[in-house]
Image: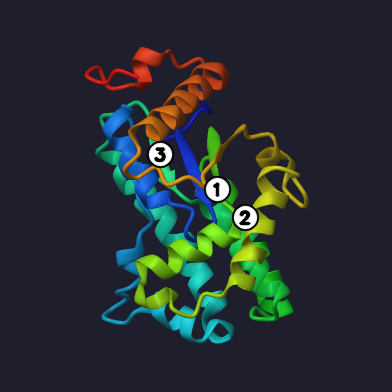
Amino acid sequence: MFHASSSKPYIVVEGNIGAGKSTFLAMIRSYLNAQIVFEPHDLWQNVGGENLLDQFYKDTGRWAYTFQSYAFLTRVRTQREHALRATEPFQVLERSIYSDRYCFAKTCHELGLMSSLEWKLYNEWFSWLSEIATDQPSGFIYLRTDPDVSFHRVHKRHRSEEIGVTHDYLSLLHQRHEDWLIHKRGVDASIAQVPVLILESNEDFQDNNLEQKKHIRAIVEFLDREFNVPPHMSVLPTVTL
């Protein structure tokens, strides 16, 4: 069954920048009986009138620790606020505090954009707060995307904050996702045991009905196999797969 939770059981959609997570969650909303929780970009782009996300991309070395700290806070708060008004049996989140820890913050430290002291501080409070302030996810859905595809999509959508995102940076993030979700390298034992559904996502599924239904079938089977959630409980009654 789903992991016991004080709020709502949840599954997280993970993947590189440009993997198509927002599009994927919008698609899930049309098929699954789940509450969809998008990343709180609006909070990152307006902190008392200032755009922290833009500052992070413009001067990552200055703002990496600050942004990762605020990302943790806003992810936890956003999930809880949505859970309070949810009528669906479970949540599906866009990214998590764990991708922040194992992919983004770790990459910032490896690139020298987060100092050794900041990295130690981050890990110390992350370990404590993740235990007392959050519930472990029931599963991860990994949208596995080649860095070349991610790079193309990022520059095609042309978000102002992402103009400086390089192919090398996306390649590093891709490897961090692979290390975490597939190879389980350097991952806490409890998170390493969370089941992962890997969906190959190089194909554009936004306007491809067959590709969408293929992914949804895989998710429904994942829910049934890993958590004993019958298909009729996860799929909206009006949907035929």
Q: Quadrant of the C terminus?
A: top left
Q: Closer to the camera: disc 1 or disc 3?
A: 3
Q: Nearer the viewer, residue 200 or 227?
A: 200
Proximity of marks 2 and 1: CB atoms separated by less than 8 Å:
yes
Rendered position, 61 above or below 128: below
Mark 1 or mark 3, which has the lower sequence index? Answer: 3
Quarter of the image where one finds residue 86: top left
Q: Is residue 194 visible?
A: yes
Rounded to the nearest angstrom, the CA distance separating label 2 from label 3 is 24 Å
Amino acid type indicated by mark 3: Val
Measuring 69% from the left and 73% from the top, which residue is drawn there?
109
Measuring 42% from the left and 44% from the top, which residue is drawn there?
93
Q: Tell me if mark 3 has few (under 14), some (14-19) or many (20+) residues whose alpha carbon lies within 10 angstroms of its own.
A: many
Amino acid type indicated by mark 2: Trp
Q: Tell me if mark 1 has few (under 14), some (14-19) or many (20+) residues whose alpha carbon lies within 10 angstroms of its own.
A: few
Rendered position, 69 above or below 212: below
Q: Closer to the camera: disc 2 or disc 3?
A: 3
Rendered position, 234 above or below 190: above
